Image (tube, rainbow, N blue to C red):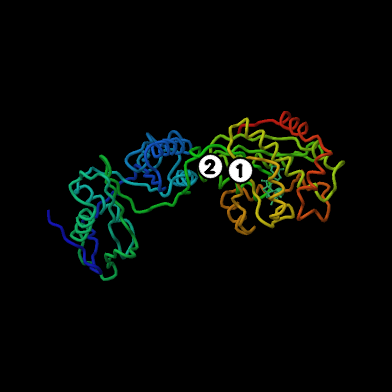
Amino acid sequence: MKITLLKENQAIYLDKQTRLKKTEAMDYVICHYSEIGLKGKNRKFFEEKLVENIKRVLKPASFEFVKRISGRIIVKLSKKGMGGEEGEKGMKENLKKVFGIAYFAFATSVPQKIKNIQENALKVLENKKFKTFRIFTQRSKKEFYLTSQQVNENVGWYILKKSKIKNEKLKIKVDLEDPDVTCFIEIVEKYAFLYLEKIKGQGGLPVSVSGKVVVLLSGGIDSPVAAFFAIKRGVRAIFLHFHAYPFVSRASIEKAEKIVKILRDFQGESRIYVIPFADIQKEILMKTPAKLRMILYRRFMLRIAEEIAKKENALGVFTGESIGQVASQTLENIKVIEEAARLPIFRPLISQDKEEIIKKAREIGTFNVSILPHQDCCTRFLPSHPATRAKLEDIKKAEKKLNTARLVKTAVKNSSVKII
Ligand code: ATP
Ligand code: MG
């Protein structure tokens, strides 16, 4: 086999006569993940979860199978090029919601022979407008008789050979550094895949590989974003929403449920605990100093969260707190609040500005629900000057007047779970 190295800036022209009329249809989606430390048993578990999660977001009729092959997950589309009833666009949107995928591509599969790869690379490229191109091969099947570099050279050489000067305006060059278009070739197990576009995925880890947590979900802007970041790292989120119904309307409950519906796209079937908080608030209102109220509310929320976490075998609590955003989120107050619980508390938004959080909320799709009006259970009867540097001893003194254990137990008992 003759192998010709492509020279940089070599001008080539696609010969119209050699153009094949029909572009080969895309029949697979190749999903790539990239996480260091994915070794041994961990890797198999990770890949199996990823297969499961990909199947979950795709419409059943749109694919024939989803399976792992070395270092990738491949999806065989049911109708050539169409992705079945779902279409390429819908599929793209859905795959972008699967954590664990670094990037994916709609690819054309061809027989694993250099001749077929060459011919199909030309087909894939011929309907594309570009001035510069390159071929980029990944070969995980080491038995294949050509190295990745040799495939690049052979395919590039073939495209050059099939090209001739037609018209100055049609001039195309090979550019290995910054081409207009790259034809990606993957040779893996019994397959050879060709594609032109890598689509960025969500990154992160597949849902459920990291264990369970409870997420305090208020219905505001921040906590849904915190939940998103929990799910991103492979954590299964169980949602907890505290409400003051019947003293306020059910609006906050409805909002929280709508938000879970949106987050469900990322983690699949989800559970939300709706927890009555009005009795606890009433007691705090009657028996403790006004400026400590918010901190006392938060400490009760954590205690209840801890009880539910125990029942659910959850290993931590996620909140949407960010330093200094509101009075209860000063470092001093955060410290006093978290003293009420022993479970680790995770605050993925702790150093983010409100603008950054809003941007993410818009991306996720929760923002428009979060800004709907509702009466927050905790902002009722709040003093205009809440404590910003609460002292633990003052808090403990105030809590002596409350029957903490009973209030927590009753709230847990009266909570209801909904599967969304
Ligand atoms: P968010 O936008 O999430 O409401 P926030 O900036 O309004 O956050 P706070 O109201 O002080 O901040 O709440 C801090 C965190 O406490 C929230 O991010 C959430 O995790 C939790 N939280 C507050 N209220 C509730 C509630 N009613 N139910 C469940 N969790 C809550
Ligand atoms: Mg709030």
Q: What element carries label 1?
A: loop
| Front residue of this view, candidates 267 and 131 | 267
Rendered residue at 64%/49% (across/down): 320
Residue located beneath label 1 in the image: 344
Task: Characterize the local packing of mark 1: few (<14), some (14-19) or many (20 or more) Cα atoms within 10 angstroms.
Answer: few
- 379 horizontally vs 162: left or right: right
Could you say which quadrant of the image residue 161 lies in?
bottom left
Q: In this view, does 17 lie above or below 52?
A: below
Task: Characterize the local packing of mark 2: few (<14), some (14-19) or many (20 or more) Cα atoms within 10 angstroms.
Answer: many
- As drawn, the label of residue 59 is none
* Furthest-top residue in this view: 413
Q: What element carries label 2?
A: helix
- 137 horizontally vs 99: left or right: left
| Front residue of this view, candidates 149 and 10 | 149
- Choose mark 2 or mark 1, whichever is in front: 1
- 402 horizontally vs 326: left or right: right
**Residue 359 image position (x, y, % from top left):** 59, 56
Q: In which quarter of the image is the C terminus?
A: top right
* Furthest-left residue in this view: 1
Q: In this view, does 24 lie above or below 42?
A: below
Looking at numbered disc 2 in the image, what kind of residue is underneath it? Phe
* Furthest-right residue in this view: 286
Residue located beneath label 2 in the image: 266
Question: Which tag, 2 or 1, sits closer to the chain's start?
Answer: 2
Could you say which quadrant of the image residue 264 lies in?
top right
Rendered residue at 79%/54% (across/down): 387
**Residue 145 image position (x, y, % from top left):** 17, 47
**Residue 13 image position (x, y, % from top left):** 24, 64
Looking at numbered disc 1 in the image, what kind of residue is underneath it? Pro
Rendered residue at 29%/43% (across/down): 109
